[in-house]
Image: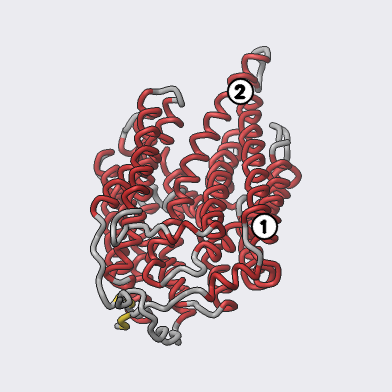
Amino acid sequence: MATNALTRPQPAPAKSDHRWLVLVVVSVAQLMVVLDATVVNIALPSAQADLGFDNSQRQWIVTAYALAFGSLLLLGGRVGDIVGRKRTFLIALVAFAGASALGGASPSFGVLVIARTLQGAAGAMLAPAALGTLVTTFQDPRDRGKAFGVFGTVAVAGGAVGLILGGILTQYLSWRWCMYVNVLFAAAAVFGALVYMSETKPAVRPRIDVGGTVLAALGLFGLVFGFAQAESHGWSSSVTTTSLALGVALLVAFVRVEQRVRQPLLPLRVVSDRSRGMAFAAVGIAGVAMFGLFLFLTYYLQLVKHFSPVLSGLAFLPMIGSIMISSNTSNIVTLPRFGPRAVITTGMLTGFVGLGYLSRITVHSSYAGGVLPALILVGLAMGMVMAPSMNTATAGVQPQDSGVAAALVSTMQQVGGSIGTAVMSTIAASATTSYTAAHAPVSGLAAAAATHGYAAVFLGSCVVFAVGGALAAVLFPSKERLAAMRESVIPAAAVQG
């Protein structure tokens, strides 16, 4: 029987002379996508005052982006595999820039929500195309380690950069520039892609798995929407429970469909390997802890310590520095030497210590003594977890599957963030209410109660890291297994353009 044209062994594409410039281009695009999940948070009060929408509507500025991004990621990853990553990358960049310009010029709340939805849809194509390009461009293990170190730094630190940039733009220009700035990022990335990126696409174009696409999109939409409703309406809300139940049921149906179709949206071989599956899970676990930290530490700095938007963003700089150091060291030095099991387990345990320290904060804690040491430790932890997990999750993936594997990485980070925001919001609200009920109404009670809620969130995130560390120690592969995964790749036929 003839070998399928998609998997027939062919000579690997020649290594690009511009691969490091390609890394810069895809990192700029990834930064734009990641920071847009947080840059708007700081701008929300100004946008609300300008456009005149209610507090009950405010969450939709954030949720609209998350819903479109999270539910369309798998489709976006497969589109890149089918029509070519460079073409997908360019189309998504232009769409993201157009949606951002529309958002910046929004005359009303409704237009702003539409713009955020379009941003999320464009981001769902852009993020997998960026990471998928990285996977196919860097095949040498050492170069791949360096590339994933840089990309991992951007993927994790982008949220903190968004807080800094959002504060600066809102305070000194306008909230609208939190949207307009994406046009500048996109223009730079489009120029770089046109000059330095080459097209790769399969010799035989596979068909879109329509049934799988619909089930995946609706299932992921149900999960993200359900967690968003849990944050605002509680876990017992009928909308929350129905959305989560439907989301899980649709994703179970999606898996059943993918087992039967000839050209699935998500080939189950991508996730069936235990090592790769654990790497996807690690990205989700880190997402739970990371989004909770960004959100509630920002609340603590601004509402309790009275930091300005700019100063609260700058307070995260030490964590960004730690992520940069740790991501690159982990991928270049420690991952090849010790393997993902040792590196990622150590990262999870470092996060456990850092968030455990942060859970001790009080109203009177200083930034230098109460917050800074934790930020440094958590930054080191994120660098040791995220970049090596991305590297491991895409190791051994066939080139024709690299886009959907990259999409799954982003999906896990997005779903993890949605879970983290919803669960940690519930923990914060419950702890704050309990503290208020147990203490007499005195001056400063509101700040003390809020701080108690934030500390409970950090303790909860600490437990998440502990669970992640235990799973990583048991399920992650050794360095020998990681090397074997990489050597198992069969280059796919590709057309260079």
Circle 2 or circle 1, nearest the eye: 1
Which x, y percent locates residue 484?
Answer: 58, 72
Residue at 29% over, 42% down: 113
Residue 446's label in the rendered image is: 2
Q: Quadrant of residue 108?
A: top left
Instruction: Please say if 367 is above or below 314.
Output: above
Q: Amino acid at mark 1?
A: Leu
Name the one closer to the observer, 172 or 406: 406
Residue behind mark 1: 380
Query: Is disc 2 in contact with disc 1, using a CB cutoff of under 8 Å?
Result: no
Instruction: Please say if 26 is above or below 470.
Output: below
Which x, y percent locates residue 409?
Answer: 46, 57
Residue at 31% over, 33% down: 52
Mark 1 Cα within 10 Å, few/some/many (few <14, many 20+)? many
Residue farthest toward the top in the current orientation of the protein = 440
Is residue 179 in view? yes
